[in-house]
């Protein structure tokens, strides 16, 4: 009888608990005090500590980053028939809440300089749709968008700016945390993010009144009354106290995770950057990325599918760059403003394994597999 040896799975980006066990300390406290119900000191502490970390006045811990975007749109007054600009090169969670509010998305192209929302395309969209209610900007793969130009355009046209920083916690734009330039910022703690609570998100803002309203909505809009009374539509969006305990522990190792993500990116760039047709995700003088997913584009004989297949054959996870929203079956009926840069990035892009638990041996194995494709 023969057995087949299965290589250890190398993930794209999986949960990474602290070596110090910080998370378990907070979770144990929740169990020891019997505060395993939805709210408790861990929720309050996580909100306070995250707000302090990024430099926002207020934060609301929620069940997901998607919930945070939804409540940001509600706080911005977005409703039925309103227009909301959204990057086309993103995950659908950025765009879905626009539909939740019965609003209309208009998708904005990327540029090669940032891979994020193109300010020129945004300016064109503002001329075409001067009635736009809000703009959502994404910091893709931990790369910050060109925030000076985007903020300037939004202020000029009096449009609410929402930052989807789900992928960019720990990224700085000109020395300031992404997620804190707009009227509202969103972070995600999904299992694949740079720090995780297994699932969850955070809404941040300097507008404390709006944040109190968001917290009210997220708690089923329960009025101040002895009996259960609801004068507004509410949502079951609050983060649990146990989950928040994981987040408090993870927040203590954020800088370690950013350092490792940067190390992974530099390793790949050094080893693969000179291969014919390879171009790595852009970096700018004003950008200090967290490099959540190290990504590159190919323009040559070797194609993204070749890399995906070669890595998967060795039980190594990789994936394409996000498929643009305006190309998605559900969203293709909505308007798109741009020159097709996002389509090219999708067609040619590769997200490389970026798991912070990888060893140098893992990284060496990955680059040797990829380099081998240029030798065939």
Image (cartoon, rainbow, N blue to C red):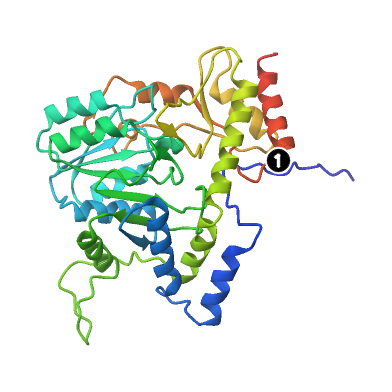
Left or right? Give the position of 48 relative to 21: left
Could you tell me which residue is drawn at 25 percent across and 68 percent down?
A: 216
In this view, 200 is above or below 150: below
Q: Seen from this angle, which residue lies furthest right? A: 1
Q: Residue furthest front?
A: 175
Residue 146 in picture, x, y percent from top left: 32, 30
For the point 15% across and 51% down, the residue is: 79
Which quadrant would residue 285 be assigned to in this image?
A: top left
- Residue 183 at x, y percent in the picture: 24, 48
Assign the C terminus to one quadrant of the image: top right
Q: Foreground residue, 107 or 59?
A: 59
Does the rendering let one see residue 332? no
Check the image and name the residue furthest to the left.
Answer: 131
Q: Is residue 57 left or right of residue 84?
A: right
Q: Secondary structure at mark 1?
A: loop
User: Mark 1 highlights which residue?
Assistant: 359
Q: Position of residue 373 (x, y in %)?
A: 66, 19
Residue 55, placed above or below residue 163 = below
Residue 346 showing in the rendered view: yes
Residue count near mark 1 (Cα–Cα under 10 Å), binned few <14, some 14–19, many ≥20: few
Out of 7 and 237, give the one closest to the viewer: 237
Q: At 21% from the left edge and 31% from the top edge, which residue is drawn?
A: 335
Q: Residue at x 14, y 34 (%)?
A: 156
Q: Is residue 225 above or below residue 300?
A: below
């Amino acid at each position: 009888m023969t057995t087949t040896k299965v290589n250890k799975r190398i993930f794209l980006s999986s949960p990474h608990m602290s070596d110090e066990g910080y998370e378990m300390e907070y979770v144990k406290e929740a169990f020891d005090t019997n505060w395993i119900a939805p709210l408790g000191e861990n929720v309050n502490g996580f909100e306070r500590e995250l707000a302090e970390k990024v430099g926002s006045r207020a934060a609301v811990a929620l069940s997901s980053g998607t919930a945070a975007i939804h409540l940001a749109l509600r706080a911005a007054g977005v409703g039925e028939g309103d227009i909301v600009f959204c990057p086309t090169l993103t995950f659908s969670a950025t765009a879905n809440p626009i539909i939740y509010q019965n609003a209309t998305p208009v998708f904005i192209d990327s540029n090669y300089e940032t891979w994020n929302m193109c300010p020129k395309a945004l300016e064109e969209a503002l001329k075409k749709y001067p009635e736009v209610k809000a703009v959502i900007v994404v910091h893709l793969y931990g790369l910050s968008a060109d925030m000076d130009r985007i903020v300037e355009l939004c202020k000029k046209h009096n449009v609410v700016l929402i930052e989807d920083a789900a992928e960019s916690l720990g990224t700085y734009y000109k020395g300031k945390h992404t997620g804190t330039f707009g009227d509202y910022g969103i972070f995600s703690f999904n299992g694949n993010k740079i720090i995780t609570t297994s699932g969850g998100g955070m809404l941040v803002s300097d507008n404390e009144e709006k944040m109190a309203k968001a917290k009210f909505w997220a708690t089923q809009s329960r009025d101040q009354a002895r009996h259960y009374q609801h004068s507004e539509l509410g949502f079951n969006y609050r983060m649990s106290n146990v989950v928040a305990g994981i987040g408090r522990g993870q927040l203590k190792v954020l800088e370690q995770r950013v350092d490792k993500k940067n190390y992974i990116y530099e390793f790949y760039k050094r080893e693969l950057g000179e291969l014919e047709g390879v171009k790595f995700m852009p970096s700018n003088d004003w950008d200090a990325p967290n490099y959540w997913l190290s990504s590159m584009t190919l323009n040559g004989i070797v194609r993204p599918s070749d890399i995906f297949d070669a890595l998967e054959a060795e039980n190594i996870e990789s994936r394409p760059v996000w498929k643009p929203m305006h190309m998605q079956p559900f969203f293709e009926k909505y308007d798109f403003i741009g020159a097709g840069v996002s389509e090219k990035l999708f067609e040619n892009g590769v997200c490389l394994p970026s798991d912070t638990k990888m060893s140098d041996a893992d990284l060496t194995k990955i680059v040797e597999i990829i380099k081998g494709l240029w030798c065939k």
